[in-house]
Amino acid sequence: MPSQEITTLLENKLVQLTKRISAIEADFHKGRSQDFSEQATETENDGVLDEIHHEAKLELSLVKSALKRITDGLYGSCVECDDPINPDRLSALPYTTKCIKCAI
């Protein structure tokens, strides 16, 4: 069973990512400027925001999966070989699903 610190870290990350995704989605839904040069800048920014949105949703999925593995009692075991994942690796990347050997 992981430490309460890891569980709290993952739960906080879940909240943070959910807020970030909501803010990005709200930005996508707001109106655009009437000024053509502003529209060009906004379009360029939309591309960057879209990538950030995609990455945040991917990370959110990984965090949710890690929290489910905690609930299911599977957290800390590699999904490939079932060996324990090094605690230092879990501290650095708490939602990892693979040991270093299988991740390579």
Image: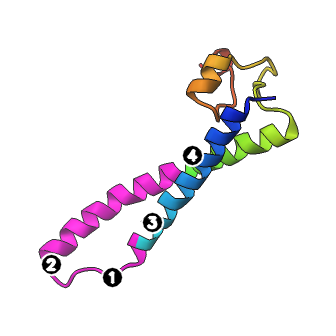
Query: Of the residues under marks 3 and 2, which one precedes in the sequence?
Result: 3
SS for dot 3: helix
Task: Please state which amino acid type lies under the numbered disc 4.
Answer: Glu
> Please, is residue 45 above or below residue 84 in the view?
below
Q: How many labels sit on residues?
A: 4
> Quadrant of the rendered structure where residue 90 is?
top right
In the structure shown, which secondary structural element does the residue marked by tag 1 occupy? Answer: loop
The residue at which mark 4 appears reads as 59
Residue 5 is marked as none
Earlier-in-chain disc, 3 versus 4: 3
Q: Earlier in the sequence, mark 2 or mark 1?
A: 1
Q: Residue 36 carries which label?
A: 2
Amino acid type shown at disc 1:
Gly
Q: Which is more N-terminal, label 1 or label 3?
A: 3
In space, the residues marked 1 and 4 are separated at their CA atoms by 28 Å
Query: What SS does tag 4 mark?
Result: helix
Q: Residue at image x 75%, y 26%?
A: 76
Badge 3 amino acid? Ala
Q: In the drawing, does residue 40 fall left or right of residue 102?
A: left
Mark number displayed over residue 31: 1
Question: Where in the figure is residue 10, as x and y percent of width and height?
Answer: 64, 42
Residues in magenta, as a range: 27-56
